[in-house]
DNA sequence: ACGAGATCGAACCGATCGGTACGATCACGC
DNA sequence: GCGTGATCGTACCGATCGGTTCGATCTCGT
């Protein structure tokens, strides 16, 4: 085997461990809320190892956000897909998934949007912008399937609702936010 | 006069100048994106002066956010008030005001929400939470005036739309976001 | 004219940060 | 068994940060 797979010394696994820990701690405490030294301590990895896998902290941040964006996007797309062909059912499934997310004790809002609010660096903003575009594509597709007169407009409206629900759930607790968002989303879809 | 009003040495004016500059630069570059030394340089004020008016940087941040929250809240309330008695007109006026805000070149999203995404400190989170509650009160009042069956639920839905529109306008440009948000808001109000 | 208080400018402090360097250790392939 | 490369632990570096201190200057009320 060219690449050891179960051993302690396995670059791919090390890299994944770094990404996993960084994803969690950056989400919990903010991109600038944890230093590289502390992060390495949490993972049980030396700085040299981290810096062989990532050019610098910004590159690590980019990788974390990129991976997170893909995971979330796929998660929502899968939820919609599993709900069948009915546009309303697909939309309901998306907001049901969001509702469960809001109730998780580790929920702290959207990691991408939070990151964009912290790092005004164009790199981070671009990743977040693409992230929202993926959501927009999913929601616009639902609006198109529902034969809305203006699917793009409805998609945008649903995107605002999705992002706003995430913000409100983070700031005001998840209580009924998920349900209200779901209700509003279905109303916007059927009313258009 | 116990307090000099037009002179160069005027603690109240100095304090206001610090707050003004800090509000602007914290909004543009982030709470941690500008140091106290640079901030003082921009204002033309020494560190000692800043630290006589504010106990520390966190206290300055709190004061900036508190003032900003009051300003924004009053601005939206005034817009609604000026629109007359019709609930739909009041709501439309609120989202018209938002649309103009989104188009300003300095627009960078909601300063309070951004701050909460940066500083996980409970102080900042509390200020932001109160800020959203003020918006919620305004929107719920409109829903109540419109004789919605469940004004609290509609208020929450409108709040999500408002916050989501602000996020989307920041990330995807202001283009038609304001119009779409306005349309969606009126639809949610009249459909409930 | 005098004293009080606000302000300036610059030096200074300790802590922390991102990032590098070095010697030692460990696991694997040949 | 030997070499290669991944890893560790630690020390180190320069920069920056929030915050303090001090002497000089300025303004104002009395």
Image (cartoon, coloured by chain):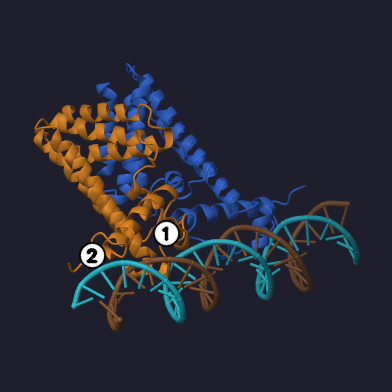
Chain colours: A blue, B orange, C brown, D cyan
Q: Residue at x 27, y 54 (%)?
A: B67
Cα–Cα span, label 1 and label 2: 20 Å
Q: Residue at x 68, y 61 (%)?
A: A48
What is the tally of numbered marks visible in this picture?
2
Q: Position of residue B191 (x, y in %)?
A: 18, 27
Above or below, D15 against A184 in this view is: below
Q: Position of residue B155 (x, y in %)?
A: 19, 40
Labels 1 and 2 in the same subunit: yes
Q: Which mark is residue A142?
A: none
Q: Pointer 2: what residue? A: B4
Q: Residues within 10 Å of mark 2 (few under 14, many from 20)?
A: few
Can residue A35 be seen by looking at this rendering? no
Mark 1, secondary structure of its residue: loop
To which chain does the residue with label 1 belong?
Answer: B
Compare residues D20 and A57 and report the one nearer the observer.
D20
Q: Residue at x 31, y 30 (%)?
A: B178
Look at the image and tell me in which quarter the C terminus of chain B lies. top left
- Please identify the quarter of the rendering in which residue A179 is found: top left
Q: Residues within 10 Å of mark 1 (few under 14, many from 20)?
A: few
Q: Pointer 1: what residue? A: B44
Q: Position of residue D2 (x, y in %)?
A: 90, 64
To which chain does the residue with label 2 belong?
Answer: B
Q: Position of residue C10 (x, y in %)?
A: 53, 70
Above or below, B53 against B185 in this view is: below
Q: Residue at x 32, y 29 (%)?
A: A157
Compare residues B65 and A159 and report the one nearer the observer.
B65
Look at the image and tell me in which quarter the N terminus of chain B lies. bottom left
Q: Earlier in the sequence, mark 1 or mark 2?
A: 2
Q: Along the horizontal axis of the image, is C21 left or right of A159?
A: right
């Amino acid at each position: 085997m060219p690449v050891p797979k179960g051993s302690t010394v396995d670059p791919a696994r090390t890299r994944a461990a770094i990404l996993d820990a960084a994803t969690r701690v950056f989400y919990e405490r903010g991109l600038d809320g944890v230093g590289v030294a502390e992060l390495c301590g949490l993972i049980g990895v030396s700085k040299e190892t981290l810096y062989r896998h990532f050019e610098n902290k910004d590159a690590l941040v980019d990788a974390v956000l990129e991976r997170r964006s893909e995971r979330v996007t796929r998660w929502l797309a899968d939820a919609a897909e599993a709900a069948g062909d009915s546009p309303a059912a697909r939309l309901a499934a998306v907001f049901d998934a969001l509702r469960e997310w809001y109730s998780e004790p580790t929920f702290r809002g959207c990691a991408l949007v939070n990151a964009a609010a912290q790092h005004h660096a164009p790199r981070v903003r671009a990743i977040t912008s693409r992230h929202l575009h993926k959501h927009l594509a999913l929601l616009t597709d639902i609006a198109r399937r529902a034969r809305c007169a203006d699917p793009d407009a409805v998609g945008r409206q649903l995107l605002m609702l999705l992002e706003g629900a995430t913000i409100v759930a983070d700031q005001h607790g998840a209580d009924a936010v998920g349900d209200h968002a779901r209700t509003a989303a279905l109303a916007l879809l059927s009313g258009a």
